Amino acid sequence: MKTYKNFIAGKLMDSKSGRTFENRNPADWDEVVGIFPKSNAEDINMAIEAAKKAYKKWRTVPWPKRSEIMRRAAEIMIEKKEEIAQLMTREMGKVINETRGDFQEGIDTALYASIEGRKFFGYTLPSELQNKSCMTKREPLGVWGLITPWNFPIAIPTWKVFPCILSGNTAVIKPATYTPACVGEFAQILQEAGLPDGVLNVVYGGGGEIGEAILSHPDIVGVSFTGSSEIGRRIGEVCGNTLKRCSLELGGKNGQVVLKDADLELALEGVLWGAFGTTGQRCTATSRLILEEPIYDKFIEMLKQKTESLKLGNGLNKDIDVGPMVSESQCESVHSYVEIGKKEGAKLITGGESYKEGECVKGWYYKPTIFIDVLPTMRIAQEEIFGPVLSVIKAKDFKEAIEILNNTVYGLSSSIYTNDLNKAHKAIELAETGIVYINAPTIGAECHMPFGGMKNTGNGHREGGWTAYEIFTEIKSIYIDYSGSLQKAQIDTWE
Ligand code: NAP
């Protein structure tokens, strides 16, 4: 068990509050993974002050020099991959193969940043006038607040930190209370890679207290947030009132459609991975399965059998398919949706209860759960459950399947299994989601592709790839007049 401290101006320090909180292993609640400072607004003020001071110099460091630090960070991350993946499984619960993947996403994002630093293009454009040139360049904004959730303890922080600081900004990050340790380790890696003091500061504590202190601070120029739509609305409101830039990556209610011509075995593997990977705790998790009528009964039979063969257990052990939920309250929240589903008249065919047998006796385990005969209007087909619960819906044909797919307030990810090229292209055109997969599950983002959703999933920004850099930079338009005389744009000249 390690005691963590806030990381401010390159130094590890206790909270001014004198309070702490502990983080326990969801696979074994007797294990305390770490003790963390429970910070207050005073700590946030210090961190923002440090970031503000560092910004003056950091913004002048050339992009390629900044990106060299990202490359060094990637090298250190490669060395520490196994160590931190194990820590992540202990603090968050998902199985080791998935935490390795989460960390690999962070490494990939660092490597992407190391390339982006040498090719961060602006535009050159023709001018309406002679002897005049036009161009654009991108510049940093200042000090950012980065607020992250617990389900991707490294990938999501790196999606924000690398583009934010490579662009010349500085930042204060507040990791989720359930998964604080990984971000602490990540900050140490960046320091080892040569990141100057104060460019990235880490403050631990509760969202209601220090999250709000970040939002309301006048020196914060922008907030990048990933989490629930509920908190996202609150953040958007505060940032709207104070005219801070704000990027919001929020919830999802993702659907996988399987058409009658699809490769059913492939679709089956896809839905098992999409629905029960990370114990269903992904923003892109497959929460709805939409089956075309002729294959409905057959596919459900295949699905039930495979689901019941999934092995639950501590994600550090071999051959485990599904780890625990992150916490007791997450387990309770999932169970309350199961009760709602039963009351609504959906048919529970497997799961629907917590699991406390064998090695799982001291963890927050919940059995992979399937409801069939779900109607698109039921709450279990509409609301984000964020756990291993799959709602299966019947569609009479392709047209109805797409209508059901789009019948939600969210718009993050969708998946269509078909071998009909025309239907695949039509689905891409009609799906109201930021990400569309053909013959692949709803999960599996790659770091160089834009990531984000439509409708209530966000506010139009995209993390990942080049689009993340659009969030963290301002565009400057530059006109250079080398005519030596006053030229007036758009003004008619009378000879
Ligand atoms: P959450 O409860 O909204 O919390 C997210 C972060 O916000 C945490 O760090 C939390 O701190 C903090 N927070 C809470 N109240 C706050 C406030 N008033 N002001 C500022 N910050 C505050 O979400 P979560 O349970 O951690 O994560 C699950 C949600 O994230 C799901 O809805 C999922 O779909 C979404 N998600 C979306 C994406 C995407 O890219 N679209 C990716 C991953 C997850 P505490 O931890 O201290 O409460």
Image (cartoon, helix red, strand yellow):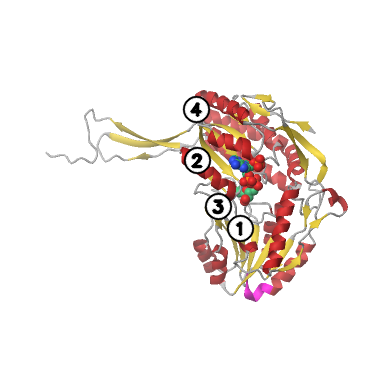
* C-alpha span from label 4 to label 1: 39 Å
Point out the tag, 4 or 1, that comes first from the N-terminus: 4
Point out the tag, 1 or 2, that comes first from the N-terminus: 2
Which quarter of the frame holds ligand 1? top right
Q: Which residue is mark 3?
A: 457
Q: Which residue is mark 1?
A: 253
For label 1, count other residues whose C-alpha is less than 10 Å away and answer few (under 14), some (14-19) or many (20+). Answer: many
Residue behind label 3 places its C-beta within 8 angstroms of ligand 1: yes
Q: Secondary structure at mark 4?
A: loop
Q: In the rendered view, tell whether residue 374 sits above or below residue 460.
A: below
Q: Secondary structure at mark 3?
A: loop
Q: In the rendered view, tell whether residue 417 sits above or below residue 251.
A: below
* C-alpha span from label 3 to label 2: 17 Å
Point out the tag, 1 or 3, that comes first from the N-terminus: 1
Q: In the rendered view, tell whether residue 148 sits above or below residue 375.
A: above
Quadrant where the image shows the C terminus = top left
Residue type pointed to by label 1: Lys
* C-alpha span from label 1 to label 2: 26 Å
